[in-house]
Image (cartoon, rainbow, N blue to C red):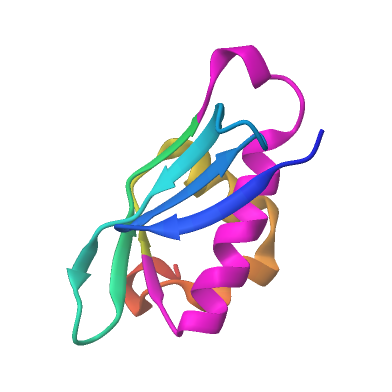
């Protein structure tokens, strides 16, 4: 399934080519000057669940955050699990999150 990913207004949004929402990640800035965000929510449209979409969204977010120089604080339970499962993601964590 082709998936288009866009970054807009502190969200990473995945859609089909016709604009149907597949999923999104919400990451508001908690300190814009320090480029620190809190990963609040990973959402996948129920129609697309069970297809590994959340993992693909997380990988896209990590790539974006790395390129943008963001430091991440985790709030979403799925994101916490994903960062535990993928130690290579931990480089993005805020110092207080790296325990």
Query: In the image, 90: left or right of 36?
Result: right
Query: In the image, 25: left or right of 37?
Result: right
* Residue 70 position in % (x across, y down): 41, 78
Q: Residue placed at 63% from the left, 31% from the top?
A: 18
Q: Residue placed at 68% from the left, 51% from the top?
A: 85
* Residue 78 position in % (x across, y down): 51, 38
Q: Residue furthest front?
A: 18
* Residue 39 position in % (x across, y down): 37, 53
Q: Residue placed at 53% from the left, 34% from the top?
A: 23
Q: Main secondary structure of the magenta part?
A: helix
What span is colored magenta in the figure? Answer: 44-72
Query: In the image, 94: left or right of 78?
Result: left
Q: Residue placed at 58% from the left, 56% from the top?
A: 83
* Residue 3 position in % (x across, y down): 71, 42
Q: Between residue 17 and residue 50, name the one nearer to us.
A: 17
Image quadrant where residue 9 sits: bottom left
């Amino acid at each position: 399934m082709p998936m288009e990913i866009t970054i807009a207004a502190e969200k990473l949004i995945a859609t089909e080519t016709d604009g149907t929402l597949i999923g999104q990640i919400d990451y508001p800035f908690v300190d814009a000057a320090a480029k620190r965000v809190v990963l609040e929510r990973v959402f996948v449209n129920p129609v697309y669940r069970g297809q590994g979409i959340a993992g693909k969204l997380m990988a896209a977010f990590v790539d974006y955050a790395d390129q943008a120089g963001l430091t991440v604080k985790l709030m979403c339970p799925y994101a916490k699990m994903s960062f535990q499962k993928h130690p290579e993601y931990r480089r993005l964590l805020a110092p207080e999150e790296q325990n």
